Image (cartoon, helix red, strand yellow):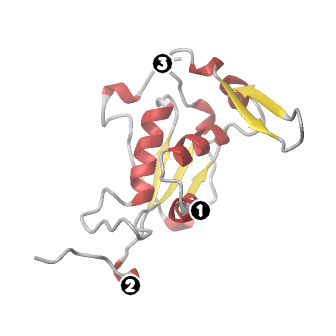
Amino acid sequence: MKTYTATPAEIEKSWILIDAEGIVLGRLASIIATRLRGKHKPSFTPSMDMGDNVIVINADKVQLTGRKRDKPNYWHTGYPGGIKSRTTGQILEGAHPERVVMQAVKRMLPGNKLSRQLMTNLRVYAGEQHPHEAQQPTVLDVKSRNAKNTREA
């Protein structure tokens, strides 16, 4: 028996729209990472970009469980003494709340060249509007998949 390996000509990509309003961040990120990687397809090949293009709207209305809203996120500027931090709540209330979802998805993908290529297939928007209506995305209802996926504020 031979192992099946997909070729670039056999890969079919589709567009998926996910509404993140009221959905728990970690559960949303794991679903998005699975779709980006292409693991939901029977022809999954680990070394290929098999996944779909994912559009996430309402990223500013994502929910966090426990005290994760108060968890600090650190980064370094590269200069001596240049460590900076901001809580997840501050990022969500700031100018770019979509970065919380982007970072969560990025950390659920393997750290290699393929994951950086996969991240280009993810589009995250803070509000309802997105410029991808021409692609006719299929709506993926994450709320109805499991009752634990949603959380009230």
Q: Is residue 7 above or below residue 44?
A: below
Q: Residue at x 48, y 51 (%)?
A: 109
How many angstroms separate mark 2 from mark 1 (CA)? 20 Å
Q: Residue at x 48, y 53 (%)?
A: 110
Identify the residue under disc 2: 9
* Image location (x, y in percent) of residue 147: 32, 26
Tell me which numbered mark, 3 or 1, is placed earlier along the sequence.
1
Circle nearer the viewer, 3 or 1: 1
Q: How many neighbours does mark 1 have within 10 angstroms: few (below 14), some (14-19), or many (20 or more)?
A: few
How many angstroms separate mark 2 from mark 3 (CA)? 44 Å
Tell me which numbered mark, 2 or 3, is placed earlier along the sequence.
2
Q: Amino acid at mark 2?
A: Ala
Identify the residue under disc 1: 120
Q: Amino acid at mark 3?
A: Glu
Q: How many neighbours does mark 2 have within 10 angstroms: few (below 14), some (14-19), or many (20 or more)?
A: few
Identify the residue under disc 3: 152
Tell me which numbered mark, 2 or 1, is placed earlier along the sequence.
2
